[in-house]
Image: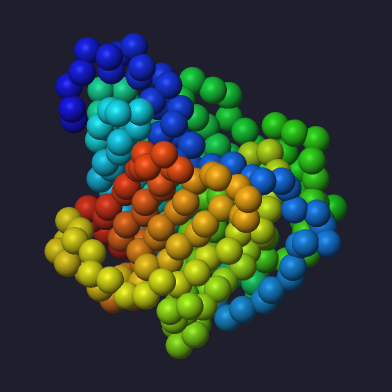
Amino acid sequence: MQTSNAFPRNAQQLMCALLLAAAGAFTAAGAASPAEHPVVKRKVSLPPSAELHYNIEAKQRGLEVTGEALVKWNNANNKYSVNAETRAMLIGKILEASSEGDIDSYGLAPGRFVDKRFRREPSTTTFNRELNTINFTQSAENYPLKGGEQDRTSIIWQLIAVARGNADKFTSGSEWLFFVAGPRDAEQWSFKVIGREKIRTGQGDVNAVHVFRAPPPGDQGQKLDIWLAPSSDWYPVRLRFTDPDGDFIEQTLDSVNKKPVK
């Protein structure tokens, strides 16, 4: 980590920026209306349960920061859960995010998404399957449940499941749409496959599929690059969040521990 006398004074501001990126909390240009909420059913193949450890490197507001993230993915008995914890050097735990729910014909069917950020109260997004609505503790917005909706933690794993189930179509230039809920609202996300690239990880060089998610047209928000490894059950080996000013946060896989669910 770069040493700087300014770091303690700016630590909380820096962590806020880091939290947004680590959580994938993109700034929406505007929440999607029900008419813009497509229902798309695709073949899915969920990866086996695993714990993934990542090293984090970031540049925010002229400062360099390092940290680590642990992601616990469980898939068993038609249920799933994802728990992610992010820590920054000298600061400690800065983010906890979790998603849990069922597995249905669309893939992951979230029931609850909880986002807990540094020194803030947790936010909860509920996918009410009885009333067929998505509700938020942080806003009065609500959206209809039509099938296939995701949250900002489950979406990575739904993307993996779609890639595994459609490997022959998950090729350069293809586009994949999802309806994704955050802490306050929901919108359509578009992922485009860029191509195959070699990525250096803690386990050596890996041939990965590069997938890119840009903000909606007219939105100057954050960009997301994901590299998925077909040779390792399509687990994400790198994620990079880039701000319009060039600041970034990058998570690179250090280790994978495939664990049966108890």
> As drawn, is 137 to the left or to the right of 142?
left
Q: Residue at x 28, y 76 (%)?
A: 231
Give the image quarter of residue 40: bottom right
Q: Residue at x 66, y 58 (%)?
A: 188
Which quarter of the rendering shows the N terminus?
A: top left
> As drawn, is 1 to the left or to the right of 190?
left
In the image, 225 versus 203, the foreground residue is 225
Q: Residue at x 74, y 68 (%)?
A: 38
Which quarter of the rendering shows the C terminus?
A: bottom left
Q: Is residue 102 visible?
A: no
Q: Position of residue 191 (x, y in %)?
A: 53, 65
Q: How is the image coloured?
A: rainbow
Give the image quarter of residue 37: bottom right
> As drawn, is 226 to the left or to the right of 200?
right
Q: Position of residue 111 (x, y in %)?
A: 66, 52
Q: Position of residue 106 (x, y in %)?
A: 65, 72
Q: Is residue 115 above or below residue 158?
A: above
The number of callouts visible is 0
Give the image quarter of residue 232: bottom left
- Which residue extends farthest left? 204
Q: Residue at x 27, y 58 (%)?
A: 256
Q: Is residue 231 visible?
A: yes
> As drawn, is 63 to the left or to the right of 260?
left
Q: Position of residue 153 (x, y in %)?
A: 52, 50
